Image (tube, rainbow, N blue to C red):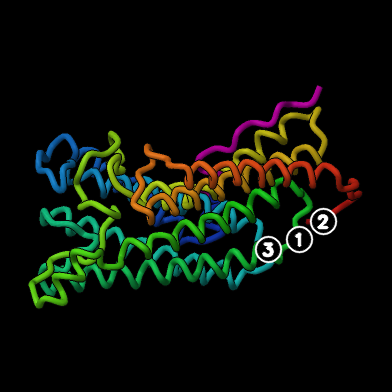
Amino acid sequence: MSATPSAPSMRSLWSRAWALSPPLAISTVLMVLGAVLTTMGLFLDPRQLVGEPIWLKPMKFYVSLAAYNATVLYFFSFLSEKRRLVRISGNILAAAGALEMVAITLQAARGVRSHFNIATPFDAAIFSTMGIAITVLWVTMIVLAVALLRSRLADRPLAAALRIGFIAAVIGMGLGYFMTNPNAAQLEAMRAGQRVVEAGSHTFGAPDGGPGLPLVGWSTQAGDMRPAHFLGLHAMQVLPILAALLARRRHRSEAQRLAAVRATGIAYTGVMLALAMQALRGQSLVQWDAVGLWALALVVTAALGTAAATLRRPPVSAAVA
C-alpha cells in the first residue's frame, strides 16, 4: 500500500520560497507581520478616517500583498528555466511592495489618507512615490505574464488557469489608474485656481466616504472601481485553486477540466470588466440597469461558448500547453 503524500511543512515551503526569490520570501513574511500588527491597531487605535477605522486600509493592503507575494512565488516555480527573469522580478516586486506599504502605513500613522492626498508637498510626494512603485510593479507583472504565455506547461488546465489568472490580474491592477484621475469637482476647482487637497477618488459620481458595504466600504450609491480592481487582482489565486480542485476529480477528462477552467476564466474576467464599466458609468455594484445586465448576459454567453468550443476540439495526446 502506497503512503498518502503528506502536506509540505512550513520549513519545506520556506525553503522553496527562499530558493525562488529570497527578497520576495522575506517580503511575504513582513506583509503577514504587518497584517497582524495593523489588525491589532484596529482594536487599539479608535481613530477614524473617511468613515472607517484608520488601520483598516493598511490591514487590507498587507493581507492582499501577502497573498500576492505568495502567489507570485508559486508562479515562479513554473519559470524555473528563466532564472534571471525570476531573480530580477522578485527583487523588483519585493522593493515595490515594501515601498507601497511603508507609504500607506506612514500616512495612516499620521492620521491622513495615503491615496489621492495632495494636501501638502509631503503628501503629494508620498502619493507620487506610491504611483511610481505600483507602476513599476505593474510593468513587471506584464513581463511575467508574457513569460507565462510563452512557457511550455504539460498540465493544460493548470496552464490555462495560470495564464488567464495572471492576465486578469494585470488588467485588474491597470484599472486602478482610473481612480487616480481628478474627478469633475476636483478639475473644476483646479481650473478656478482653488486649493485642492485630493486628486482622484475611489468613487465615480459621488465623494468618497458615503454609504458602502461592510468591511470593504465599496460604495452602494455611486460607481466604485474597487470591486473590479479587487476581483482582477485575486484572479491569480482563484483560477489556479479551481484547477487544483478539478485535478482531484479523476472521473473528469482533461478536456472537461480545461473547458471548466477556460469558461470560468472568461466569466471571471468578464464580470471584472462589467464591474469596471459600472463604476465608470457611476452605477454602484448593487444597482444594475439594462446596460449592465446586458453586459452580464454577454459574459455568460461568452463563457458558455468557450466551454462548448473547448469540448468540441479533439483531444490532444501528450500535449504541451
Q: Dot 2 corresponds to which residue?
A: 320
Q: Quadrant of the N terminus?
A: top right
Q: Which residues are magenta?
A: 1-14
Q: Note whether residue 30 is visible.
A: no
Q: In terms of secondary structure, what is the magenta stretch mainly? A: loop
Q: Position of residue 160 (x, y in %)?
A: 69, 51
Q: Residues within 10 Å of mark 2 (few under 14, many from 20)?
A: few
Which residue sits at x=86%, y=44%?
Answer: 312
Q: Which mark is residue 225?
A: none
Q: Note whether residue 262 is visible.
A: yes
Q: Relative to 26, is 184 on the left or the right?
A: left
Query: What residue type is disc 2 on?
Result: Val
The front one of 100 and 303 is: 303
Instruction: Give the Cα distance between marks 1 and 3.
Output: 8 Å
Query: What residue type is disc 1 on?
Result: Arg
Q: Circle 1 — which element?
A: loop
Q: Quadrant of the C terminus?
A: bottom right
